[in-house]
Image (cartoon, helix red, strand yellow):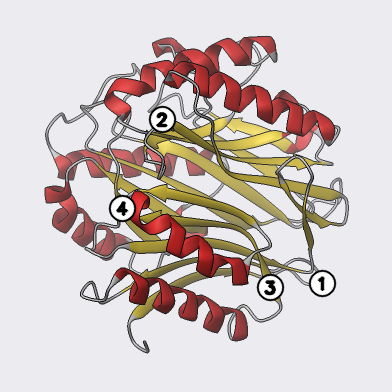
Amino acid sequence: MQNKTKIETFRFDAVGGVTEFHAMIRVTDPTLTYQEQVNALLGAYDNLLQSEAKGAVAVFKRYFLSDAANQVDYLMAQEMEHAGCALSVVEQPPLDGTKIAMWVYLMTGVQTRALPGGLYEVKHGEYRHLWGGTAMNRAATSEYQTRLLLNDYILQLSEQGCRLADHCIRTWFFVQNVDVNYAGVVKGRNDVFVTQNLTDKTHFIASTGIAGRHADPKVMVTMDTYAIDGVKPEQVHHLYAPTHLNRTSEYGVSFERGTYVDYGDRRHVFISGTASINNKGEVVHAGDIRQQTRRMWENVETLLAEADCTFDDAAHLIVYLRDIADYAVVRQMYEERFPTHPTVFLLAPVCRPGWLIEMECMAVKRMENAAYPAL
């Protein structure tokens, strides 16, 4: 399967500290069978672990599938050989015509283990990073599924001596039939957040809420999570970019546009799913994919600037498109502006029909701050 895959990587080194990698691994031959594509992808991943990322371990993986109901079983059977980190699997078809793609986040010098409650612990120095992947249940509606997901997660955090408001940095909600079910996700999240002192007077959590399917059609919502134990309140900052974006609470939802976390040796920036929106909460450039893409970039760039970062600091880009017919245009735009960034393009409608495109990213910037321990 040589030359059947492409690996795009971002590497951050810290002298005497944790080296981290973000990698997007894609198949380049869509004529391969699904089994061949999985084997090629995992072979490329193994090669990464033996070459550029030698000595690193995965702390989080997400697989993007084209047809989860028919693909999950084979993938999980193969994944058994690579177990050891939080695992996310979602049906969001890669737009290059292949059946599977992977985002993997790796670190050196960390200790990892599965916790009894279902989270994965990544430990180094003063910090425990707690990752969760593909949490799900089969409650009757998307609202109740969301309530249960969050309430179960609150209990998982509590078992680790953590709280949702103090320690959770990032969430992802993948919603089957997002045009219908997203309203239930919003209500369920809003109601739980109020009980956790997460309000427009305190703060919310950086998040992406986007279309995505589970293999089981009864599962309307799945959730991925990231929290940090050992971080102090003054290390965590929220991003607003008020010249370009409004507070999400103004149109009834509850997430932060972005969050950054400062360590002694670096800054991690988490940009939530961001679309072509203005600071009144309105869709900008309705129906125009090129202009929506440019405005979305401008919004993300403004959020990054608030964290003293640029796109040069971006470790990976995840791009969601509503309409497969827009892929060729958007891919060309990204290839011109971001030719070396690890990027994946996915078919996944955004939570508001007027938005044709959305993106999220994570950035890493070198810092020297003696007030905080290194990562």
Dot 4 crowding, Cα within 10 Å, few <14, some 14–19, many 20+: some
Q: How far, Cα to Cα, is label 4 from label 2? A: 15 Å
SS label for mark 4: loop
SS label for mark 2: loop
Dot 1 crowding, Cα within 10 Å, few <14, some 14–19, many 20+: few
Q: Which amino acid type corresponds to the residue marked 1 in the rendered image?
A: Gly
Q: Which amino acid type corresponds to the residue marked 2 in the rendered image?
A: Met
Tell whether 117 sits left or right of 275.
right
**Residue 132 at what x, y percent from top left?**
63, 44
Q: Residue at x 82, y 35 (%)?
A: 232
Contact, mark 2 vs mark 3 (Cβ under 8 Å): no
Nearer to me, 91 or 324: 91
Q: Residue at x 51, y 61 (%)?
A: 76
Dot 2 crowding, Cα within 10 Å, few <14, some 14–19, many 20+: many
Specify which label sits upstream in the sequence, 3 or 4: 3
Q: Is residue 49 above or below residue 154?
A: below
SS label for mark 3: strand
Instruction: Kindly indicate the quadrant of the structure image that contains residue 30.
Output: bottom left
Q: Which residue is mark 3?
A: 56
Q: Which residue is mark 4?
A: 67
Specify which label sits upstream in the sequence, 3 or 1: 1
Q: Which mark, residue 220? A: 2
Contact, mark 1 vs mark 2 (Cβ under 8 Å): no
* Residue 282 seen in render: yes
Q: Which residue is mark 1?
A: 16
Dot 3 crowding, Cα within 10 Å, few <14, some 14–19, many 20+: many
Quadrant of the rendering where the C terminus is positioned: bottom right
Q: Residue at x 34, y 55 (%)?
A: 70
Specify which label sits upstream in the sequence, 4 or 1: 1
Instruction: Kindly indicate the quadrant of the structure image that contains residue 134.
Output: top right
Q: Which amino acid type corresponds to the residue marked 3 in the rendered image?
A: Ala
Question: How many numbered marks appear?
Answer: 4
